[in-house]
Image (cartoon, rainbow, N blue to C red):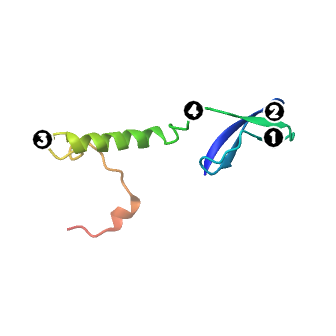
Amino acid sequence: MATYEYRCPRDGIFPARFPIGRAPAGIRCVTCAAEAVRVFSAPSLRAMPRPLVAALDRAGRSAEAPEVVTRVPGRRGVARPVHPGHARLPRP
């Protein structure tokens, strides 16, 4: 199913879902039942959140040219969050 946009002369643009390639040129408006014509618009290419897109791009780049590191990241200078339950654990 794909989402298509239709323009009503009274209510403006509204979405409608049809199987791909089966969308009619015109349908009735969902609000006023007037004849609405199909309009062509840009697809929703930015539907994913930006942090997810950045992570996917980083993962793709690392497959071709991985980053070189000289030490294990996150070992020094990073304070670990203290959990109250950790105080009750046995110590070595």
Instruction: Tell me, yes or no, whether the two marked residues, 4 and 2, touch with CB atoms within 8 Å.
Output: no
- C-alpha distance separating marks 4 and 2: 20 Å
Q: Quadrant of the C terminus?
A: bottom left
- C-alpha distance separating marks 1 and 4: 21 Å
Which residue was labeled with disc 2? 11
Which label was assigned to residue 70? 3
Which label was assigned to residue 29? 1
Mark sitting earlier along the chain (4/3): 4
**Could you classify mark 3 by the number of other residues whose Cα lies within 10 Å: few (under 14), some (14-19), or many (20 or more)?**
few
Numbered disc in front, either 2 or 3: 2
Mark sitting earlier along the chain (1/4): 1
Report x, y in % for residue 47. 52, 41
Which label was assigned to residue 75? none
- C-alpha distance separating marks 4 and 3: 45 Å
Which residue was labeled with disc 4? 42
- C-alpha distance separating marks 2 and 1: 8 Å
Tag 4 secondary structure: loop
Going 27% across and 39% down the picture, which residue do you hit?
A: 61
Among all residues in the image, which is located at the extreme bottom? 90
Mark sitting earlier along the chain (2/1): 2
Q: Is residue 1 left or right of residue 57?
A: right
Please name the amino acid that badge 2 sits on.
Answer: Asp
Numbered disc in front, either 4 or 3: 4
Report x, y in % for residue 13. 73, 33
Residue nearest the observer in this picture, 21 or 10: 21
